[in-house]
Each structure stands twice: as structure tokens, then as C-alpha cells.
Image (cartoon, helix red, strand yellow):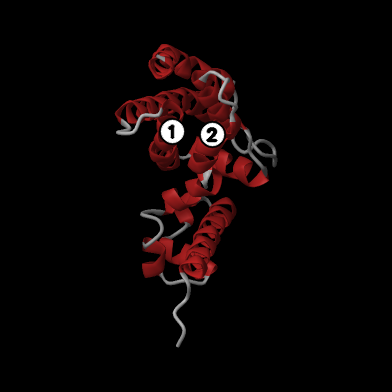
Amino acid sequence: MTTPSPGLRERKKQATREALREAALRLAVERGPEQVRVEDIAEAAGVSPRTYNNYFASREQAIVSAVTADREARIAAAVAARPAEVRLADAVTEAVVEQYTTTDERGHRALLLITTQTALRDAFLDSTAGMEPPLAAVIAERLDDAPGHTARVLAASVAAAVRIALEGWLSTAGNAAAVEGFGAGGLVVPSGSLSGRLRTALAPLAPAFDAAEQNVKR
């Protein structure tokens, strides 16, 4: 019997993860998150509950993953793609704003649920910590910060700032959704400027990024 190559194994794992988060979102939209069990998601994705638990710790995590999937890697890649002459603080801010404010239809459906469910909002906020490792790696390369201490502090600060921005935005959006319900058969989209909140939360970090870049140039 031939052992699957690491590449094939990783592709299968990724396919399973995608199937689980798609099933979780679809069932949550159809039934309401509180009516969805882990067993239901696993069955819809064609795997066992035990396999499900290898990928997600809760139904909320799986549902939220439908909108946050791969965002951490995309933020890091966007920063890395910026030209070297672009100020690092600007590169990080633009990457974060772009990835948090660009959503497709699936993302809108997930955001609708997130704004109306406390457990989903908590899972969404917790997901910000996932950006730290890939963002720290990119910042370390940009700053030639071999040990990575400065990069890790900056990345952790960015994650904290994003969480603070999301907390305020979700609070406002959640109140609006609670009043409007599900919007006369339509989709309730969170209100308020998320991009503005993100820029405001990240602005205080700019001097730290500038100082770190100045140290590299000396």
C-alpha cells in the first residue's frame, strides 16, 4: 500500500477543513447556530465527530472560520508584497483593513450570524490572535530582526489593536442587528465603518513601527 505524499495529505486535510466550515455555515444559516450540533456538521461534511474535533474545538469556531479562513496568511502576504519603500506601518494598516473589509457572499452570511450571537462574536474576536505568527515572521524579515523579539511584540500589538476595533464595531453592529432582526427577508449587514475603527486602533502603533525601521537603517 502506497503512503500518501505529504503534499496529498495536506491537500486532503485542507479539503476536510473547508468542507467542515462550509457545512457549519450552511447549517447555521438554515437552522440558527443554536440548533446546530457538532454531529450535524460532521455528518454534513462526510466525516466523524472525532475527525471534526481534530480541526475545530467548537461549532462557533467552525462557523467563524467560514469568514476568517486563511485571513492571517493573506494579511502577512499582503505586507510582504508591499514595496520596501512603503512605510511598514502603512503596509500593515492597509493589509489589515483590506482583509477585514473585503468579504464575499459567504462572508456576509457569516457576519450576519456573528453580529447576532454572543458566542460567535467571542469566537470571531479570539480569531485575531491567529495573525501573530505569520505577521511576526514577515515583520522580522522586513526589519532583519533575527531573534524576532521586536517583530513578535509589534505583531502582538497589531492583533490586540484589531481585536479592540472589532469589539467596538461588533457592539454597534450587534445592537443594530438586534433592532432590525433579519431585515424583512434580507441580509443584515453590520453598520458603522470597520475600516475607520481599524485605522484608529492601529494609528498609535505607527511610532513603534517607525522606530523599528529607523533602527534597521542605522
Q: Does 42 sit left or right of 67 as displayed?
A: left
Task: Give the quarter of the figure containing the N terminus.
Answer: bottom left
Which of pointers 1 and 2 lies earlier in the amino acid sequence? Answer: 2
- Residue type pointed to by label 2: Ala
Q: Is residue 197 visible?
A: no
Q: Is residue 57 visible?
A: yes
147 versus 123 height, above or below: above
Q: Quadrant of residue 83?
A: top right
Q: Nearer the viewer, residue 111 or 82?
A: 82
Q: Gap between marks 1 and 2, in whole Å?
A: 9 Å
Q: How far from the left and from the top, in percent, is residue 129?
A: 38, 37
* Image point (41%, 59%), residue name: 55
Question: Given this view, does label 1 or label 2 mark the residue nearer the observer?
Answer: 1
Find out whether the residues at labels 1 and 2 contact each other: C-beta distance under 8 Å.
yes
- Residue type pointed to by label 1: Glu
* Image point (63%, 38%), residue name: 103
Residue denoted by label 2: 80
Task: Give the quarter of the figure containing the C terminus.
Answer: top left
Q: Nearer the viewer, residue 92 or 161?
A: 92
Q: Residues within 10 Å of mark 2 (few under 14, many from 20)?
A: many
